[in-house]
Image (tube, helix red, strand yellow):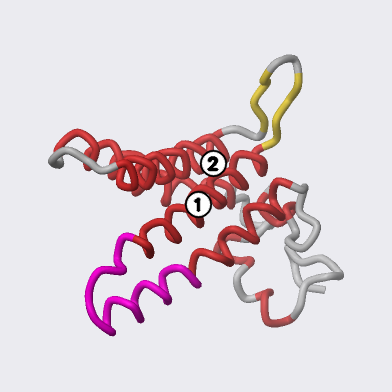
Amino acid sequence: MCVGTTKHDSPRRRWLYPVVGRASGVNRRALLLVPAAVFLPGSVAFAVLSPPHTILTAVLLGCFFVAGFGFAVAGLRASVPVGGRDVPWYAFAGVADVALGVGMVLNATRMLGGGAEDAFLSAVTAVSGLPLLFVGVDYLRGGRHFDLTAFE
């Protein structure tokens, strides 16, 4: 067996381990800081610097802010004490994924204003948000379908 693999790893996934694998010592959860670095400042800058918003735009920006905050917490902390209970990192990542998925679906509704191109792009955006919703709900449930230990 290769270094950094487990008995459940497929040969197709083994090539990744020397780069960001368990044996390399790289914290994979730190990769969650990348979307946090995009969504947190982006949503704040858009909210502050853009013209007045509609309710839909405000909710969309709120979704992107929650996603950025959730990804930041998940990337920085293994757990956070909330009300006498430790909330694990994957709960924050799950909330972030759900918020991002909802934001994508809301953004798709905003795009429905023009012709056939807008309708196609809106449908693709909405359908792209559905896997994020699924992943987020699975993370909130503790990783029934996705292996959360790969990030630890």
Residue 18 in percent (x, y) is at 60, 66
Residue 53 in percent (x, y) is at 22, 41
Residue 33 or residue 141, whichever sits in front: 141
The residue beneath circle 2 is 75
Q: In what element is the residue under mark 1? A: helix
In this rendering, the answer to whether 45 lies above or below 98 is above
Q: Is residue 21 visible?
A: yes
x 80%, y 57%: residue: 144
x 70%, y 46%: residue: 140
Single out the residue that lies furthest toward the top: 84
Q: In what element is the residue under mark 2? A: helix
Q: Is residue 115 left or right of residue 76?
A: left
Residue 57 or residue 79, whichever sits in front: 57
**Residue 75 picture quarter:** top right
The residue beneath circle 1 is 31
Q: Is residue 37 visible?
A: no
User: Overall secondary structure of the magenta stretch?
Assistant: helix
What is the span of residues highlighted in magenta in the rendered image? 110-127
Q: Is residue 91 left or right of residue 30?
A: right
Rounded to the nearest angstrom, the CA distance separating label 1 from label 2 is: 7 Å
* Residue contact at pointers 1 and 2, CB within 8 angstroms: yes
In this rendering, the answer to whether 121 lies above or below 36 is below
Residue 117 included in the magenta stretch of the image? yes
Amino acid type for the residue under numbered disc 2:
Gly
